[in-house]
Amino acid sequence: MIPLQAMAIALAALFAPLVVLTRDLVRLTMAASLYAFSLVVLFVILQAPDVALSELVVGAVAFPIVIVVAIVMQRG
Amino acid sequence: MTRRVRLALFGVSAGGLTALMLWAVSGLPAFGDYHHRYGILLNKVAVSERHATNVVTAIVFDYRGFDTLGEEFILFASVMGVALLLRDVREDAERPRDATHSDVLGLVGIGLAAALLVLGLYVVAHGPITPGGGFQGGIVLASAFVIVYLAGEYRAYRRLTPHPALDLVEGTGAGGYAVIGIASMLLGSAFLHNFGPFGMPGTLASAGSIALLNIAVALEVSAAFVLLFTEFLEELMDTRLETG
């Protein structure tokens, strides 16, 4: 494992508990998006660009949009 | 159950799980150590056999094409379920315009949407050549439409994405994948077997039916995501109308 890979794994490990520990729904969505982005970085560093692209469009963009719309719906 | 009992239960199970995980991780091959024969084989033959320089796409749409058929139908079924649940309870009337409107936001939004549209088409078309493909490109295409909505143009968004067109595109994408599979059978080989023509590796017109399946998936995924977003959005508009 080279230092860059270790750093990317550490970044993902940092954001994952952040998602679990955040209580406010809007912040949670942003944290989830950030966590997905840290996974994108990890996948790129591990030379899996296809998976990185999927994670980027689904985890960092599509999923937060659906959640934000759901939150707005909930609040009316 | 009291707090103490719950904590004790959590402690025991968390400790046990940690021990089991550590045991499992200690038995894993070293980081970056790869001995999977199938993967190594595919890495060697994909370019010469299928003329697809992106081996991942060759696996997803060819060597493991049948799995992708299932995945596509999962997406199709789930989005159809959402549409059935949400569309049933409301009448299809024209929704009112959003109250806020900003020319700057509109201009930036349209510019972004155009760029996203081109990027999406690029990612889809280059699926067999570079990282990306129908799935990723399809979501990028869908987000171009979502940007139109975010720019404050709800009416433009609805005009661009009428329900019948979305349903048609989604169905064509999902059905098209199966039809391409059946086409290989009509040509005398197995279901979803790549029937070519393979073209020059590294060019847009290469990899045979992988490119076609790629486009089918792009249609399905982009329409499915736009449909999902539209259904949620209309539900939201209804809630707003009811609460005033």
Image (spheres, coloured by chain):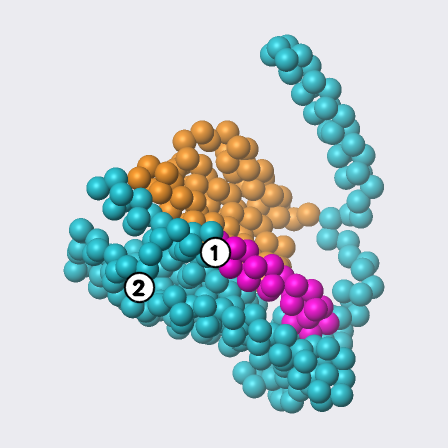
Most foreground residue, A69 or A30: A69
First reached walking from the N terminus: tag 2 or tag 1 = 1
| Image vertical order of residue B163 relative to residue B31, above or below | below
> Is residue B67 shown to the viewer in this render?
yes
- Please name the residue shown 80% across and 65% down the image: B38
* Dominant secondary-structure state across the stretch colored magenta: helix
Q: Residue type at mark 2: give it.
A: Arg
Gap between marks 2 and 1, in whole Å? Answer: 19 Å
Q: Is residue B7 above or below residue B219?
A: above
Please give the residue where the numbered disc 1 appears in the rendered image.
Answer: B84
Residue B153 against residue B48 in the figure, above or below: above
Instruction: State which quarter of the image contains the C terminus of chain B.
Output: top left
Which corner quadrant of the image does residue A47 belong to? bottom right
Task: Label 2: state its secondary structure.
Answer: helix
Q: Residue at coordinates 66% horizontally, 84% vertically from top-left? A: B183
> Label 1's element?
helix
From where the camera sits, is residue B140 visible?
Answer: no
Q: Colour of chain B?
A: cyan
Q: Which residues are magenta?
A: B60-82
As for residue B19 lying within the magenta part, the answer is: no
Q: Is residue A2 left or right of residue B169?
A: right
| Mark 1 residue crowding within 10 angstroms, few (<14) / some (14–19) / many (20+) | few
Which chain is mark 1 on?
Answer: B
Is A11 situated left or right of B232 in this image?
A: right
Disc number at residue B200? none
| Residue A9 pos. (x, y %) | 60, 43
The one nearer the camera, A67 or B124, is A67
- From the viewer's side, name the closer residue of B37 and B86: B86
Location of mark 2 (residue): B158
What shade has chain A been given?
A: orange
